[in-house]
Image (spheres, grey):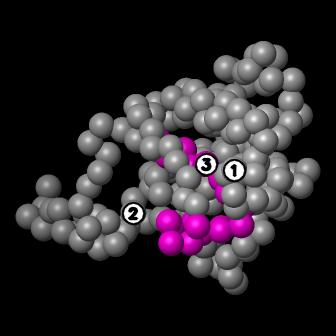
């Protein structure tokens, strides 16, 4: 090992999937509605569909495996959701946790909503639940020192793992008779 370690070894962070972000013109504020309507789930990173809601990967995740449970109906107001939509969203959160445990060995989760721009909602008019997997000791100094988040896996590879995990764990009962 060289006396320059770790500087020489760590100076370059290789994150090839980030090119997707920089090549895009402007963020598409209707991507949730488009994902709701699409027939090409893989292109929109939709993992699971139910009658009233669906589960998809976050294209610009906070952490590897960051998923979102989204109602098909576009609304910013949690109180406007029907009981079936609310139950299905939370059932998708439970399903997401099972998928993430099976696919990437998640040990814990941050789950929540950002309602309103002042609360951090990037898409203000279409609410969605965030499911962010966590691991013991998964925080580090990179975001603090350099504003850089390190993601260890590309979107397409993880999408394939999630679909494989879903095939292993899903039963007709867990699908809830949905789409």
Name the residue tied to disc 1: 79
Q: Which residues are magenta?
A: 116-133
Secondary structure found at label 3: strand
Name the mark on residue 149: 2
129 w.r.t. 12: above or below? above
Residue 109's x, y, as percent? 45, 39
In the rendered view of the protein, which quadrant contains the N terminus? Answer: bottom left
Q: CA distance from mark 3 to mark 2?
A: 21 Å
Which mark is in front, 3 or 2?
Answer: 3
Q: Name which of mark 3 and mark 2 comes first in the sequence.
A: 3
Residue 44's x, y, as percent? 77, 56
Q: Name which of mark 2 and mark 1 comes first in the sequence.
A: 1
Identify the residue at the far front of this view. 79
Q: Quick check: 61 left or right of 142? A: right
**Circle 3/circle 2 CB separation < 8 Å:** no
Q: Residue 130 magenta-drawn?
A: yes
Q: Nearer the viewer, residue 148 or 75?
A: 75
Q: Is residue 12 visible in this depiction of the protein?
A: no
Q: CA distance from mark 2 to mark 1?
A: 34 Å
6 w.r.t. 81: above or below? below
User: Which residue: 36% across, 38% down?
Assistant: 135
In the rendered view of the protein, which quadrant contains the C terminus? Answer: top right
Indicate the quadrant where residue 84 lies: top right
User: Which residue: 23% across, 61% down?
Assistant: 141
User: Which residue: 52% across, 48% down?
Assistant: 112
């Amino acid at each position: 090992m060289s006396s320059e370690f770790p500087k020489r070894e760590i100076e370059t962070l290789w994150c090839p999937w980030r090119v997707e972000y920089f090549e895009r013109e402007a963020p598409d504020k209707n991507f949730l509605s488009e994902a709701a309507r699409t027939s090409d789930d893989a292109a929109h990173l939709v993992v699971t569909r139910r009658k009233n809601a669906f589960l998809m990967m976050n294209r610009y995740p906070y952490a590897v495996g960051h998923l979102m449970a989204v109602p098909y109906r576009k609304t910013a107001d949690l109180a406007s959701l029907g009981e079936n939509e609310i139950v299905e969203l939370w059932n998708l959160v439970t399903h997401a946790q099972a998928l993430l445990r099976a696919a990437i060995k998640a040990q814990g989760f941050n789950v929540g909503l950002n309602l309103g721009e002042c609360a951090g909602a990037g898409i203000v008019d279409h609410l969605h639940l965030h499911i962010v997997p966590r691991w013991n000791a998964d925080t580090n100094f990179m975001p603090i020192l350099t504003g850089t988040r390190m993601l260890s896996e590309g979107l397409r590879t993880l999408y394939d793992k999630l679909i494989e995990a879903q095939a292993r764990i899903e039963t007709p009962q867990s699908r809830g008779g949905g789409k």
